Amino acid sequence: MDFKTMLQLPVLEISQVLKTLQGIADEERNKEKPQMPNVSIGTSRGNVSGYFINYDTEKSIVLLGNWYEKPDLQYVELHSIASISLGNIENYLYQFSDGNIPFTPNADDVPTVLQLKKEIRDVEQSVEKMLGKAIVINYDYAEKPEDLEKYYAKKTIVLLQETLAAIATDALAKEAFVNAVKELSFHLGEENTVNLQNNMLTVCLDFSKGLKSVASKTLLQDCIEKCL
């Protein structure tokens, strides 16, 4: 990223920065070789630094850690934080830009349309086992979707599977879904909406600001259940 691009970064509240860091950490911790953000936190008593490990919003505690032959952990209370310095986030700067800096996925992370169709087929089989009913899932896309759209489509497929799995664990929601839905169609847009018409559940997910603007599993589940 050049200097001119960096000038597009907005000012964020500490809580927004921590929430974004949590999302980055959640993504990295699932990788074989995690590259956690390196953080330096300024408090009224001095500075603490380490790799960002976790942030508990209910407890308002940030956990930093280092590894020098043995683990070194530091727990920081949110109300004591005066400043945060970030490092090792070159690949995630777009998440701090509120959509001003475009995200470009790595080529290895971009699926082909055929791969997406295979993943959808796998989800259909998984959903049938969970719900006891076959549900057709369609990805509504342009003739030649761009790499970014295919990348987010893959994220959407995972989100849909997790959401439908959550619905399947609730007996009433499961019954309502099975009775009302025969087909599910999803596409990417600039708003999070769910509509049900003639047994067709249409899901639009907002990726205009990347993962920050897309509906969470909980919100998507709530929107779906309101349509049933």
Image (tube, helix red, strand yellow):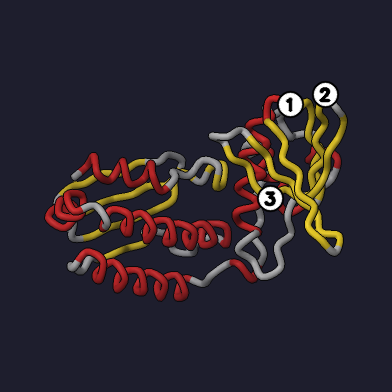
- The mark that comes first in sequence, 1 or 3, is 3
Q: Residue at x 32, y 63 (%)?
A: 138
**Dot 3: element:** strand
Q: Is residue 40 above or below residue 150?
A: above
Residue labelled with disc 2 = 44
Residue 206 placed where, x, y %? 46, 43
In this rendering, position of residue 107 left or right of residue 44: left
Q: Residue at x 44, y 70 (%)?
A: 116
Disc 1 residue type (three-letter): Ser
> Whole-Å distance between the Cαs marked 2 and 1?
7 Å
Number of the label disc, if any, that sits on residue 80: 1
In this rendering, position of residue 157 left or right of residue 99: left
In this rendering, position of residue 207 left or right of residue 138: right
> Whole-Å distance between the Cαs marked 1 and 3?
18 Å
- The C terminus, quarter of image: top left
> Whole-Å distance between the Cαs marked 2 and 3?
22 Å
Disc 3 residue type (three-letter): Ile
Residue 157 placed where, x, y %? 42, 61
Residue labelled with disc 3 = 53
Q: Is residue 86 above or below residue 10?
A: below
Residue contact at pointers 2 and 1, CB within 8 angstroms:
yes
